[in-house]
Amino acid sequence: MQWFGLLPLFDAGVTSDDVKCVKPDPELYKLAMQQLGVNPNETIAFEDSPNGLKAANTAGIRCIIVPNEVTRELDFHLMKEDLNLF
């Protein structure tokens, strides 16, 4: 992000290097919300994978699915009973 000059546009940044457990564990989202001082009801996640979707929802965050080349064939609606989808 620094290469493209995007870093100043973000108030916080959390990567898998900052947490012990990666997605689908919600630790990454919880740490990001803590750094930003926001609650789950003030947060929206954009995810491209089932693991990301589960992590966001387990953290109490509503999630918008943006599939990528690999995940666009997956049926995310099969997960809707367990998840808070937009």
Image (cartoon, helix red, strand yellow):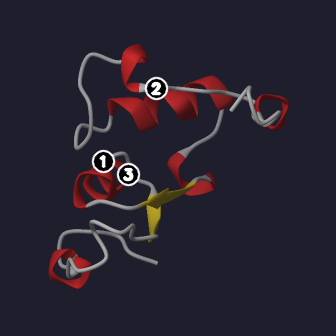
Three-letter amino acid code at the position of disc 3:
Ala
Three-letter amino acid code at the position of disc 2:
Thr
The image's mark for residue 15 is 2
Residue 85: x and y in percent read: 38, 75
Mark 3 secondary-structure assignment: helix
Pointers 3 and 1 in contact (C-beta within 8 Å): yes
Mark 1 secondary-structure assignment: helix
The image's mark for residue 55 is 1
What residue sits right under mark 3 in the picture? 56
Q: Residue at x 18, y 74 (%)?
A: 79
Mark 2 secondary-structure assignment: loop
Query: What is the spatial separation of the Cα atoms under label 2 and label 3, in whole angstroms?
Result: 14 Å
Q: In this view, does 2 lie to the left or right of 30?
A: right
Q: How crowded is mark 1: few (under 14 residues within 10 Å), some or many (20 or more)?
A: many
In this rendering, the label closer to the viewer, 2 or 1: 2
Seen from the viewer's position, the closer of residues 39 and 56 is 56
Pointers 2 and 1 in contact (C-beta within 8 Å): no
Three-letter amino acid code at the position of disc 1:
Ala
Q: In this view, does 8 lie above or below 24?
A: above
Q: Is residue 21 above or below residue 43?
A: above
Q: Quadrant of residue 24?
A: top left
Residue 69: x and y in percent read: 35, 69
Seen from the viewer's position, the closer of residues 70 and 11 is 70
Q: Is residue 79 left or right of residue 17?
A: left
Q: Quadrant of residue 23?
A: top left
Q: In this view, does 78 lie to the left or right of 17?
A: left
Query: What is the spatial separation of the Cα atoms under label 3 and label 1, in whole angstroms?
Result: 4 Å
Residue 37: x and y in percent read: 66, 30
